[in-house]
Structure formats: C-alpha cells, structure tokens
Amino acid sequence: MSDRDKKYGVIGSTVFHVLVLLLLIFFGLKTIPQEEEGILVNFGDTVLGQGEVEPKESQAPPVEQKKTPPPPPKVENTPEPQTTEAEPEEEVKTQDFDEAPVVKSDAQKKKEKEEKERLEKERKEREEQERIEREKEEERKRIEAEIEAQRQKELAEQRAREEAERKEREEKERQAAEARNRVSGAFSGKGSGESTSEGDTGGSGNQGYVTGDPNSKNRSGSGLGNSGNGFDLKGRSLVGRLPKPQHNSNKEGIVVIRITVDRNGIVKSADFQMKGSNTQDRELVANAKAAALRAKFNADKNANAYAQGTITYHFQLD
C-alpha cells in the first residue's frame, strides 16, 4: 500500500466516525418523558359543591390552593459516546511533485559574485598582513641575534686585549726589574755571577766599561752610545765603526737593540730589548734602532743564514 492510499484511508475513517457520533447525539440519545401517576379529579376551589355544569373560572371565589411541589426535572440519560481504539496515526510525509530549481536573477548572481570577491580579497589581505608581521618578527630576532653576537665578540676581544696588556705589563715590569738589577750591578762593578774576574786579556778584574752591557762579550770600545761603541755578535766582526744615533734631546739612558744579521753582514732587523736597557723612551729607542740598521758586519758564506746579537747605545749629555 502506498503512502497516498494510507493517507486517504486515515481521512475516510475519521470522517465516518465523526458522522456516527453526530447521529447518536441528535437522534439516538433522547429519553421518553414519564407521566405523573395518580387519579384525575375535577377542577374546583372547595371540597363542597352541587350541579352538573362546570362553573366559569371567574364565578368561583378564589380559594387558597394547595401548592404542589413541581415535578423533578427530567434527566436525560446521555449515553457516553462509544470510542473505538484507533491506531496511532503516523506522520505521513508525502511529496507528489519535485521541487523546481531556484532560478537566480542576474542581479542576485552579480551580488553573490561581488560578495565572494570581497571575501576573497579580505582573506588575501589578511594573509599578506600576517606574512608581513611574521617577516618583521623574524627580522627583529635576526637583528637582535646579530647585536648579541657582536656584543659577545667585542667582550671577547676586550678580554683578550686586557689579558694581553696584563701579560705585556707583567713582562715589562719583570724585564725592568731585571734591567735595574743588571745596571745597578754594572755600575757597582759587580756581576750577576759568583766569579770575581771576567775578561780575555789575562789578570784579574771585570774587563769592560761600567756603562756597557754586562751580558756583552765585546770588551773593546768605550761602551758609550754617543760614541757608537758596544756590540755583541758572536763570530762576526764590525766593518768600520758603529753608526752614531741622533741625540738632540736632554734625555739620558742605556738602550739595547737586538739585531738580526744575514750572511752578507747586513742588519735585516732591529728591535728594542728590555734586558740590559734602563729606559724605554720612544725617542731614544727610535734613534737607536735607526743607527743599528745602518751597521755593517763582515760577510761569511759558511755562517748561518741569520745571526743574532745586540748593540748597546749609551745616551748621555755632553
């Protein structure tokens, strides 16, 4: 049975039961009136009377009539409507036709297209803004990392410089202390060793000059810087005289220059040596270096490629 037939069956059954109920109410539920029981008596106004003709009602004197209670109201026995147990109605959903497709107008299509384009544009703008913010954050973090790395590098360099300066200062202090000890021993005529005699000419005594380098093995010359004397280069001899350094100031002191000489006797380098020096004056050291670089020594093809020694200059005022 189809849904349509079920629907019609339910409607027909309902209409039939309603009609039967209406017929019972209007035609089948009336009661028959009951008549009063007893003996009929002649109408009158007294218990005494004579004659065959019923007098008119106006001729009879009014008498007080005994009131009789009215009969009880008639009660109609209305039978209860018979109800039949009906099956619960099921909700019937039917569709006798297909929904027609909604036809959109050009204006609606245009509006929907514009709304879609607007939403797409907002989405792209939002994504672009998020990308820009993300790039800014990454750039900020990169710059902070570079700044931190640069700061750490500068701190490391500063610590390295401070450590180097500390070591250099300690070394200079140590060398200055040694130089002071040697110079004081040289001027007092006492060496650092335990022997009481040094030299190569025989006899006793410390051969050399009180103004010379106590570590030098060169025992000739005056040992004064302003006269250009005083060098120590083992196995090599001086060609000519030691160049005299310039001395145009009122400063005095002993400056020892460490030299490096090649096989041809040319001085290749000259550096200040703290050992044996009693001053670090820049002008005196510069003049001593310039003079040491002009010195010439004998050539020796069998010598080492480079030989090292010292030249001691004694700057004093005339």
Image (tube, rainbow, N blue to C red):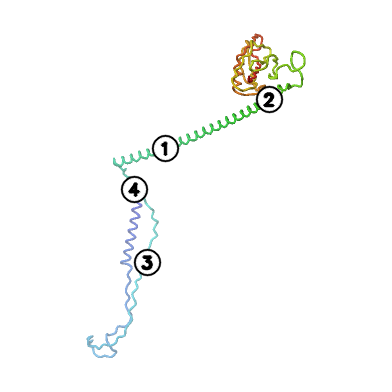
Q: Tell me which amino acid carries mark 2.
A: Arg
Q: Are marks 4 and 3 in contact (CB under 8 Å)?
A: no
Q: Which of marks 4 and 2 is nearer the N terminus?
A: 4
Location of residue 70 (image quadrant): bottom left
- Mark 4 vs mark 1, foreground winner is 1
For the point 35% across and 52% down, the residue is: 7
Residue type beneath disc 1: Gln
Q: How far apart are marks 1 and 3 (CA)?
A: 81 Å
Question: From the viewer's perspective, is the residue at label 1 or at label 3 nearer?
Answer: 1
Q: Nearer the viewer, mark 4 or mark 3?
A: 4
Distance Cα–Cα, label 1 vs label 2: 75 Å
Q: Earlier in the sequence, mark 4 or mark 3?
A: 3
The image shows residue 70, relative to residue 136, as above or below, that is below
Going from N to C along the chain, the mark reached first, 1 or 3, is 3
Asked if the residue under mark 3 is in contact with the one under mark 2, i.e. CB atoms within 8 Å, the reply is no
Mark 4 against mark 2, which lies toward the viewer?
Answer: 2
Q: Which amino acid does label 3 sit on?
A: Glu
What is the secondary structure assignment of the residue under circle 2?
helix
Q: Mark 2 points at which residue?
A: 180
Q: Separation of disc 4 and disc 2 at Cα?
A: 123 Å
Residue 129: assigned label: 1
Report how far apart the C-alphas of labels 2 and 3 lie in the structure: 145 Å
Residue 269 falls in which quadrant of the image? top right
Give the labeled residue for mark 3. Answer: 80
Residue at coordinates 64% horizontally, 24% vertically from top-left?
279
Which amino acid type is marked by label 4?
Gln
Other residues around mark 2 within 10 Å, as few (<14) / some (14–19) / many (≥20): some
Tell me the mark number nearer the camera, choosing from 2 and 3.
2
Which numbered disc covers residue 95?
Answer: 4
Residue 311: x %, y % from top left: 65, 17
Q: Please state which of residues 26 and 167 is positioned toward the viewer in this rendering.
A: 167
